Structure formats: structure tokens, C-alpha cells
Amino acid sequence: MLILLLAVVQAAPPPPPAAPAPPVLAAALPRHLRPHAPRPPRPFRGMHRGDSEAGPDSAMVAGLLAALAQTPASVCGMAVGTLGLGWGWDGGDGRVSALRDEPPGLRTERRSYRNPVRDRRAVPLLQAALARPEPCVRRAAAQLLAGSDLAESAQALRAALRHADPRVREAAALGLGARGDSTASGSLQETLRDGDQDVVRLAAWALGEVGDRSAVAALTNLTRAGSAGVRLAAAHALGEIADPAGIPGLTALLNDPDAEIRRQAVEALGEIDDDAVTRPLVSAMRDADPAVRRAAAEALGDRR
């Protein structure tokens, strides 16, 4: 079990560095790296569904979940963050860089965590883990189900959207968003009417990851929600979908009392390729918050 935990905690090497930005754009790097750098492909960003190598089997999944449950939250979060990451992650140069007492099969096991779960016996284990009390374990289960190319994995996530426990529904929405499955859009839109605001927040985020334009009207309604987290997620999702029909809702959010929401609305408007965004972006240049003004300037600069 300890071997399994150590396997996932090791950080993946970073992707090749992007070309340096011109000096005039240096201040804009935090904003501009996101829309202009290539994004890992959906459904599960980073997990190689087409890889022919075996992913973790049910025994490895069970051991992983048990180990994560006994791990401090920060270490668990770091380990879960590496699940599904590719980029040739194999722990170094194999036998050349191995420590003398490392088990000989460690490298092979470690490599398996970058590949999708294809063992059907693991799906019930992961589905049950969506109800674990540890949020890190729930996230790990959601990510592994999201990355799996088994039909049973998608079915498990959809079924979990109807679970009585809101924490399970929340994790299911996270998994469906990470999966990027457009067939889940209808279920996610129904979940926007959930009585738990955190579930609604994750469902809104997931719809943005799915990228279904039919969700724009429902997401626009959420820009008037009482929960700041829901409004923030709605703005993010509308920017991900980037449909001009979302402009009115995003423009209204420029008057939100929460500066982070106003900034997110500005960034979302900047993602929409329509001249109608120019006027609200110019208006946002007069916002009281400097981060909002900066985001507006960057969005307008991108439109040139």
C-alpha cells in the first residue's frame, strides 16, 4: 500500500516551456497563458485513453483508495493531482536511477496510473468511493471514473448524480465535467435545480467543460443566483462555451458586488468572438478593482 501511495505522489515532469512572451505582454502572462496555450484534450485532460498500456486494476485501485484515505490532506491532494498525467511519466531512467531497495515492479505500477481504468471490477469500488468522507478520496474516484473509457464508468457517474448524499452528487458532477461527455449535458442541466448550492456550482462548472450550447440559457439564469460560488461557476462556464447568447448574463455580472465574479465575467466575455462584447469590456475598464480593469484591458487587447 505504501508503494502505491509513493507511486502516485511523485510529481510528473512539467511540459515543455512555452516560448517567452514579448516584453510588452509580460504583465499579462497569468491571463494569456490560459487561453492561448494548448489545452489538454477533453474528455479527461491529461489521461491517455488511447494508450495501449494497462491502467490500474481493481486491486491497485482498492489499495490506492485505502492509502489515500490514511494520508494527510495536502499530500493526498498532491497525489491525486498526478493521477492520469502523461508526458512520459515513469519515474526517471528506470534501472539507471533506481534506488537499491526500490521494488523491481514499482516503475511498472507507477506507469499504470497514467492510463485509464479498464478493469470493470474497479468501477464499483470507485463508485462507492464517491461517498467517502475524505474529499480527496472522492476527488480521486471522480477523476479515475472520468478518465476510464468503460461505459460502466460513465453510467456510475450519472447514477451518482441522483444519490441522496449531496457530497456524492457533487463528486459525480466533478467527474462528468472532467469526462467532458456531451451525453451527460441533460442530466447536468437537471442538476442545476438541485437544492444544494455546491452541487449546483459543480454542475455549472461541468456544463462549461462539456461545452454544450444548449446549456447557455440555464447558465445565464444562474448569473442571478444568491450563491456567489454559483454565479462564479456560471460565469466560468459561459466563457468556456463562448456562445454570444451568454453576453447579456455576463454583462449583468459586471455589476456584481464580488470583484472575483466581475473579473471572471470579464474573462468570459473575452472568450466570446463577437463585437457585442466590446462595449461591456470598455465599461469594465472603469471598475473599482484593479484586477478587473487589468482583465478588461487584456481582453480588449486580444480583440485587436
Image (spheres, rainbow, N blue to C red):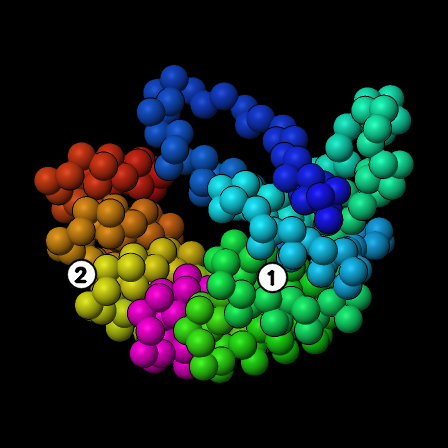
Magenta residue check for 69: no
- Ranked by sequence position, the earlier of labels 2 and 1 is 1
Q: Position of residue 252 (x, y in %)?
A: 18, 61
Image: magenta residue range:
185-207
Question: Which amino acid does the dot numbered 2 rest on?
Answer: Ala
Q: Residue at x 44, y 76 (%)?
A: 165
Magenta residue check for 200: yes
Cα–Cα gap, marks 2 and 1: 37 Å
Q: Position of residue 290 (x, y in %)?
A: 18, 34
Q: Secondary structure at mark 2?
A: helix
- Residue 54 horizontal side relative to residue 232, left or right: right
Circle number at residue 8: none
Question: In the rendered image, which residue does mark 1 sit on?
Answer: 141
Question: Which amino acid does the dot numbered 1 rest on?
Answer: Ala
Q: Is residue 47 above or below residue 288?
A: below
Q: Is residue 239 above or below residue 223?
A: above
Q: Residue at x 58, y 73 (%)?
A: 157
Q: Is residue 22 visible?
A: yes
- Residue 177 horizontal side relative to residue 94, left or right: left
Circle number at residue 252: 2
- Residue 79 horizontal side relative to residue 111, left or right: left
Q: Secondary structure at mark 1?
A: helix
